[in-house]
């Protein structure tokens, strides 16, 4: 195990399992929008940057191996990998014309506590490729050396491996009292979050660099911020602040203690493309083939739907985290309060002057 | 997909999930005994029959890939694969002395409805090898061509992909009225079960033949019968007959209909080594390196413990099957009745003139 690798993440990092009305499966339309928006960029990237000849596919007739890091329980991961496969087949046809393609093996990765049972149930009817589940944190090695041709990670890497401890420490200048996120308003807090992001992202890149063959590609999609925009100025930051205000309400009502409240922060960091670029360059194993923002809009719907999606989507992602820290009763009350408050404040969030962005990053593994 | 491949098995083929008091995890001591008893044979087989040089390990420094087909939820699968890894490392050391070994990737396979979540939870703390879950029936292809160095399957292949339809058909001479198993007393029933076994085993061998590299090994452990012994004469057959009698009681009490009873048979077939040998030879892709019976005895314990283990072990394996066919209430009543009857009749089963055997088969994939 290389330095910096992480053995396991907290249980609560997993999305809400099963396929019921509150599950991630049924409440990940925003994340699906991200995948949809990225498809053309993925297609272009494969067509222009993937050279199956240099990967040896002409002579070896090897299986093309894909991994989705942070796949959750579906169905978004299926859309993503099926799109990748289509594009690779297309490219294979373009490069080798009539020679038959030997097929795909797809590894679905997420934390050990992810609901793989639900994922596998949705998967089993598909016979177009060999598939395997890869349990464990992607902040560590998961596959043998140089065995992967294409890595994909959608909407995970703005999750940190942990909340930086300084922001929960009342003795530290980075103490983030009064906020549950890196809102950008306090320099020391931002610095602590940014350092954690840099460490995690470097660990991720180092692990993938071992696994991906020279010439192999990696697509990373993650939440971020336009350069110079603070989290508290963006709609998504206001959304987290509102969730935080619901927890503050719980403390004021005496339902939770102030200490309990102060010891909670979201393990999220929305980075700028400049920060990401610096980390990738410092790592040195990948060339940046494309760095872009996704444009997508899932908001062309009624106000009621927007609010509903915002609440259920938030639950599917954060319920585990809140339950783990505050217990299920407080989590439940918080989400109920959140729904009411979101209804009251939705125009502010919806009309925020700034929006976060979703980074699209296409990397190519250097040939050693 | 090759002819004969099966896409998916019924949900109820999975062992009882979770890790609670009734789970397979906690009630698979017999199956653990089988694994324990096989360890030395596996070690010897690897030492004598595995040639890492001819597999190219001298030059390629490839990862050694192992798959356990029908792994269930643990912990037996971990004992088995860890033993295999130890023996392979030992052999590597013997063949290459000081050169470093590149490591292992282990694929854990079982049906899609297997409780992989429980399996992965037990797995995650291990860092000595790369691991992946492989959901889907082993009566079909699961891995890319020629990517496996060692296949293992313990106590699964006496399970059929389905109950042969003739034995449930009142119009057929093979109708198995009055019995829930292939008890060996009716030639036509045995023939139907045997034909299904032959078909399933051939399908399994064909799929593995595609996946295993030339020179790679496969260990198969499965329940069977000594040549000439009928199932109804062996302790295990009496055990199933007793379970069957509990279902007959349910019909006589009017809890289930006679049609419901008649439409149920266990998808199990205990074969002779002669039958297995013929199937392997007909398949033609493997040489038989060793064919043996395991000797093991988990019965050196008190009568009470024996009965308890027999009931809970039976539940962990067959509860899904019974619930699926008769509903959970009937299944529950049946197992309660079974416990009482087992207590009354235990000396007959324990003192049976014959015992089933557990086959140990070591195969080597031919080099094409």
Image (cartoon, coloured by chain):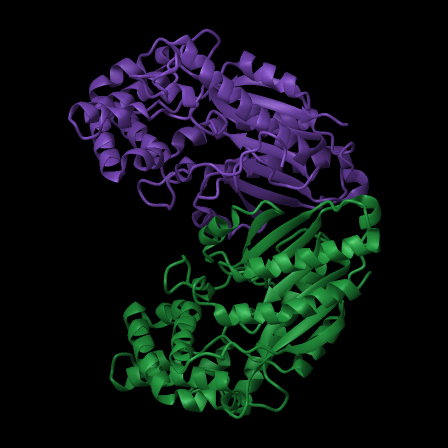
Chain colours: A green, B purple
For the residue pair A49 and A4, the one nearer the viewer reads as A49
In the image, is A65 to the left or to the right of B317?
Answer: right
Q: Position of residue A129 (x, y in %)?
A: 63, 47
For the residue pair A243 and A256, the one nearer the viewer reads as A243
Quadrant where the image shows the N terminus of chain A: bottom right
- Look at 31% across and 18% down and name the residue there: B179
Q: Write down the quadrant of residue A272 in the picture.
A: bottom right
Is residue B196 visible in this depiction of the protein?
Answer: yes
Q: Write down the quadrant of residue A37 in the picture.
A: bottom right
Q: Residue furthest front?
A: B171
In the image, is A55 to the left or to the right of B168?
Answer: right
- Look at 66% across and 36% down and name the residue there: B211
Is residue A178 visible in this depiction of the protein?
Answer: no
- Look at 41% across and 40% down and name the residue there: B11
Q: Position of residue B28 (x, y in %)?
A: 39, 34
Q: Does residue A265 sit above or below A346 in this rendering? A: above
Q: Does residue B328 sit above or below A93 in this rendering? A: above
Q: Residue furthest top?
A: B228
> In the rendered picture of this protein, how many numbered marks are placed on residues?
0
Q: Does residue B210 sit above or below A83 in this rendering? A: above
Quadrant where the image shows the C terminus of chain A: bottom right
Q: Position of residue A28 (x, y in %)?
A: 47, 67
Q: Position of residue A276 (x, y in %)?
A: 67, 77
In the image, is B356 to the left or to the right of B360?
Answer: left
- Look at 78% across and 31% down and name the residue there: B54
Q: Write down the quadrant of residue A345 in the picture.
A: bottom left
């Amino acid at each position: 195990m290389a330095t910096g690798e992480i053995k396991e993440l907290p249980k609560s990092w997993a999305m809400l399992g099963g396929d019921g009305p509150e599950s991630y499966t049924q409440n990940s339309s925003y994340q699906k929008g991200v995948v949809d928006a990225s498809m053309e960029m993925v297609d272009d990237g494969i067509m222009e940057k993937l050279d199956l000849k240099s990967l040896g596919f002409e002579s070896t007739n090897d299986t093309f191996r894909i991994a989705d890091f942070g796949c959750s329980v579906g169905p978004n991961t299926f859309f993503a990998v099926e799109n990748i496969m289509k594009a690779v087949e297309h490219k294979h046809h373009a490069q080798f014309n009539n020679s038959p393609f030997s097929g795909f093996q797809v590894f679905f990765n997420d934390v050990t506590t992810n609901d793989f049972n639900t994922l596998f149930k949705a998967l089993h009817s598909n016979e177009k490729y060999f598939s395997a589940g890869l349990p464990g944190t992607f902040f560590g090695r998961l596959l043998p050396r140089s065995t992967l041709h294409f890595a994909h990670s959608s909407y995970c890497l703005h999750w940190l491996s942990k909340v930086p401890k300084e922001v929960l420490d009342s003795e530290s200048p980075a103490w983030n009292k009064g906020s549950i996120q890196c809102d950008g308003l306090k320099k020391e807090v931002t610095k602590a979050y940014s350092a954690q992001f840099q460490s995690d992202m470097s660990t991720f890149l180092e692990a993938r660099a071992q696994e991906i063959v020279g010439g192999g590609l990696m697509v990373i999609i993650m939440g971020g911020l336009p350069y110079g925009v603070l989290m508290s100025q963006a709609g998504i930051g206001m959304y987290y602040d509102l969730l935080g205000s619901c927890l503050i309400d719980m403390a004021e009502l005496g339902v939770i203690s102030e200490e309990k409240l102060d010891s909670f922060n979201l393990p999220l960091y929305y980075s700028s493309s400049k920060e990401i670029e610096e980390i990738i360059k410092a790592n040195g194993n990948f060339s940046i083939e494309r760095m872009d923002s996704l444009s997508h809009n899932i908001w062309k719907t009624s106000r009621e739907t927007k609010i509903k999606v915002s609440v259920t989507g938030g639950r599917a992602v954060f319920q585990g985290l809140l339950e783990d820290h505050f217990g299920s009763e407080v989590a439940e009350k918080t989400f109920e309060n959140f729904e009411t408050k979101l209804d009251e404040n939705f125009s502010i969030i919806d009309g925020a002057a700034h929006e976060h962005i979703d980074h699209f990053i296409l990397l190519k593994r250097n040939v050693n």
